[in-house]
């Protein structure tokens, strides 16, 4: 299957993408990984992206699209892929459609992870990170440390990242609503969108997503028959 994963910040896209890609035996392609890989390998696209980033400018859509297309053309993506973080806007979605059409393939589904805005703020603003080891992550409500402000693992100080404050989260949500959310309507017009609730335990959301994708695949097979 060829899937695009969408949802607001804090919806758990990265976590779900990893589980879904494993269950479906397709590669998880994230924008962040694409940028890091191309920059570290010093590809032409990576050098170009870095030049914009070093100047404090946004990387143009065509550079991001070029990276994504190169990755989708790798052998392990021949039978499908799961895109996470791309496309971010309608112009990227249109360019993706054109790229896939040129390769003689098309998307099978767009999985929309739905989370109430207040829950997004609670999830992100409640995160606390260990200063000694950033892999040690706690949450004020869902996984609080035994002692407030102290990491259970190494005793390091727990802190809230600047981009995890409620004010910053709400600004990130505004950007999502303005720039990324319109792609849902764009893909809905193509009959591709499958919306599920991203509330609950990780495995519950994964099960919900897999069932929704299977139903979508079965419906498409019936339409083609």
Image (tube, rainbow, N blue to C red):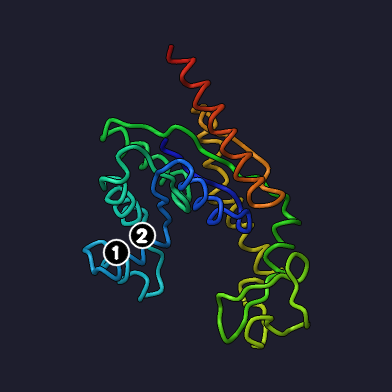
Q: Which mark is residue 169?
A: none
Residue name at image x 49 percent, y 27 percent = 217
Quick check: 92 left or right of 206?
left
Count of numbered badges drawn on the protein: 2
Residue behind mark 2:
34
User: Farthest residue in the front direction?
Assistant: 153
Q: CA distance from mark 2 to mark 1?
A: 6 Å
Q: Quadrant of residue 173?
A: bottom right
Q: Are dots 2 and 1 in contact, CB under 8 Å?
A: yes
| Disc 1 crowd, CA 10 A, few/some/many (<14, 14-19, 20+) | some
Residue name at image x 64 percent, y 39 percent = 196
Q: Which quadrant is the C terminus positioned in?
A: top left
Q: Secondary structure at mark 1?
A: helix
Residue name at image x 34 percent, y 69 percent = 52
Find residue 110 and report its horizontal and vertical position in percent.
51, 38
Find residue 111 and report its horizontal and vertical position in percent.
55, 40
Quick check: 138 left or right of 22?
right
Find residue 75 and report its horizontal and vertical position in percent.
25, 45
Q: Which mark is residue 38?
A: 1
Q: Quadrant of residue 46?
A: bottom left
Quick check: 220 left or right of 164?
left
Q: Judge whether 28 appears above or below 165 on screen.
A: above
Q: Judge whether 213 appears above or below 50 on screen.
A: above
Residue name at image x 59 percent, y 33 percent = 212
Q: Judge whether 135 appears above or below 87 on screen.
A: below
| Disc 2 crowd, CA 10 A, few/some/many (<14, 14-19, 20+) | some
Q: Secondary structure at mark 2?
A: helix
Find residue 106 and report its horizontal and vertical position in percent.
37, 32
Q: Which quadrant is the N terminus positioned in?
A: top left
User: Farthest residue in the left direction?
Assistant: 44
């Amino acid at each position: 299957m060829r899937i695009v994963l969408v949802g607001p910040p804090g919806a758990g896209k990265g976590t779900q993408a990893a589980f879904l890609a494993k269950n479906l035996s397709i590669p998880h392609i994230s924008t962040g990984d694409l940028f890091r890989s191309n920059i570290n390998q010093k590809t032409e696209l990576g050098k170009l992206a870095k030049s914009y980033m070093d100047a404090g400018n946004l990387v143009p859509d065509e550079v991001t699209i070029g990276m994504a297309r190169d990755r989708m053309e790798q052998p392990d993506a021949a039978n499908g892929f799961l895109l996470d973080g791309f496309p971010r806007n309608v112009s990227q979605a249109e360019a993706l459609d054109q790229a896939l059409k040129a390769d003689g393939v098309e998307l099978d589904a767009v999985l929309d992870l739905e989370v109430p805005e207040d829950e997004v703020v609670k999830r992100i603003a409640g995160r606390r990170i260990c200063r000694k080891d950033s892999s040690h992550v706690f949450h004020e409500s869902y996984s609080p440390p035994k002692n407030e402000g102290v990491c259970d693992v190494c005793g390091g100080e727990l802190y809230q990242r600047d981009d995890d404050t409620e004010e910053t989260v709400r600004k990130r949500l505004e950007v999502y609503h303005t720039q990324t959310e319109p792609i849902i309507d764009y893909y809905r017009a193509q009959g591709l969108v499958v919306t599920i609730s991203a509330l609950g335990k990780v495995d519950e959301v994964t099960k919900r997503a897999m069932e929704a994708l299977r139903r979508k695949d079965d419906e498409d097979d019936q339409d083609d028959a």
